[in-house]
């Protein structure tokens, strides 16, 4: 009770200190939740590309740039190449706006083309069924978990893609990889969609069944993936070969930069919040000099004075941390819900983030209170009793 009375002596000063900590912790929770989302996407896609090589005609191994399907035969002839799976990867929205993470896409690949080599993104169903060869020529689709959530559809419903309606026959379990953001359609249908999106001058010169947007190459067991990728680049003209290591280097660097921003926010919170607590506790000690002198004169030890004052500053940090964590969580959840219909989920909140934020602010308060507490404990009781 005495601790609470001490904090309530200067309500405005204590309140402003807590407010400053709250703002810093709020920012820490919000930005760390955004970093979580980015790290989750990068880690998932990194696992997806870890055991394969993505061959594309463009620089990012994704999009509507076509290649000839018969290029697969040339790839299979390269030493170290085990399986070549043709893939159609078409953006769901050709005019997609800038968003966090890779865009939604239409995927199509011949049934069984990976010959069982795909491990990370196996089509584990949450509902319905997978596609079969009998679906060729029909407008049916298996959708990823994020697509199902954003569009609010399930098995038996319809999704419209590029002005074409597809019956949903299956919904995939979340994988935290590429399929989560994909609408998987029969391979011939995907070829048609890719063909329809080409410029007329290109479209008129090639048949839909002769094109593909990507090849996924699975090296033979024991082969060095980087060496196989280098061989492909050397022997096949005008293609890009992207390995899991390449993906980590390109997208992992962005994630690392964002994480560095989070560290910067934490450091700023430490400096601003710590200085604010030091100022508050120093003024509190100055106002209570006579009281501290009396307590020291009647036998209170220096250790006890230090402990009590650091407890006060720790409580200030804890209250600010709890308030900041609550406010940050509220904003994160509200923002995700508001943006769910647009298909952009910016944040991934975790209990670990909240616990770290509260713990961080509490420790910050305790450490920041050490200097004023140490000064108070060193006061001469006689001189303190004379203090006015």
Image (spheres, rainbow, N blue to C red):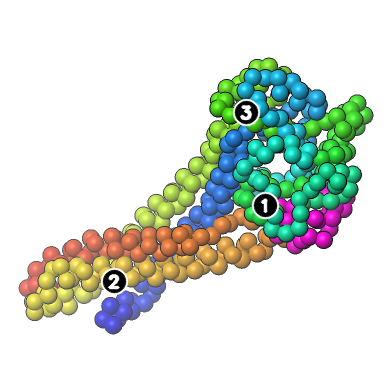
Q: Nearer the viewer, mark 2 or mark 1?
A: 1
Above or below: residue 64 compared with residue 314: above
Q: Which mark is residue 288?
A: none
Secondary structure beneath disc 3? strand
Which range of residues does the magenta coloring cover? 143-171
Could you say where residue 176 lies in the image, as x and y percent from the top left? 61, 50
Mark 1–mark 3 distance (CA, rounded to whole Å)? 24 Å
- Can residue 308 be seen here? yes
Which residue position holds label 3?
219
Looking at the image, is mark 3 or mark 2 earlier in the sequence?
A: 3
Residue 179 drawn in magenta: no
**Mark identifier at residue 312:** 2
The dot on residue 124 is 1
* Label located before the other in sequence (2 or 1): 1
Q: Position of residue 115 (x, y in %)?
A: 70, 36
Q: Residue at x 11, y 71 (%)?
A: 301
């Amino acid at each position: 009770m005495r601790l609470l009375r001490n904090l309530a002596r200067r309500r405005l000063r204590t309140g402003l200190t807590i407010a400053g900590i709250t703002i810093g912790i709020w920012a820490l929770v919000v930005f760390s939740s955004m970093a979580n989302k980015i790290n989750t996407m990068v880690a998932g896609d990194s696992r997806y590309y870890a055991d394969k090589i993505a061959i594309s005609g463009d620089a990012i191994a994704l999009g509507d740039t076509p290649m000839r399907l018969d290029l697969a035969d040339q790839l299979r002839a390269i030493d170290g190449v085990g399986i070549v799976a043709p893939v159609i990867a078409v953006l769901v929205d050709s005019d997609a706006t800038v968003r966090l993470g890779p865009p939604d896409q239409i995927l199509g690949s011949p049934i069984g083309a990976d010959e069982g080599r795909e491990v990370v993104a196996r089509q584990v169903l949450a509902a319905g069924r997978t596609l079969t060869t009998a679906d060729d020529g029909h407008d049916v689709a298996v959708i990823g978990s994020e697509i199902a959530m954003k569009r609010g559809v399930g098995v038996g419903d319809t999704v419209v893609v590029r002005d074409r309606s597809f019956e949903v026959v299956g919904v995939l379990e979340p994988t935290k990889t590429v399929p989560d953001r994909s609408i998987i359609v029969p391979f011939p249908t995907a070829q048609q969609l890719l063909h329809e999106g080409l410029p007329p001058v290109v479209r008129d010169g090639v048949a839909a069944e002769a094109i593909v947007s990507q090849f996924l190459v699975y090296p033979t067991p024991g082969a060095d993936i980087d060496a196989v990728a280098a061989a492909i680049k050397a022997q096949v003209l005008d293609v890009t070969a992207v390995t899991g290591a390449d993906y980590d280097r390109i997208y992992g660097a962005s994630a690392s930069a964002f994480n560095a921003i989070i560290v910067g926010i934490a450091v700023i919170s430490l400096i601003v919040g710590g200085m604010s607590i030091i100022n508050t506790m120093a003024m509190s000690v100055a106002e209570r000099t006579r009281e501290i002198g009396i307590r020291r004169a009647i036998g209170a030890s220096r250790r006890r004075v230090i402990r009590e004052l650091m407890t006060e500053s720790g409580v200030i940090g804890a209250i600010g941390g709890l308030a900041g964590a609550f406010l940050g969580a509220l904003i994160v959840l509200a923002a995700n819900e508001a943006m769910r219909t647009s298909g952009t989920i910016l944040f991934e909140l975790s209990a670990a983030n909240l616990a770290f934020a509260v713990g961080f602010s509490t420790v910050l308060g305790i450490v920041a209170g050490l200097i004023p507490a140490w000064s108070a404990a060193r006061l001469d009781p006689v001189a303190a009793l004379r203090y006015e």
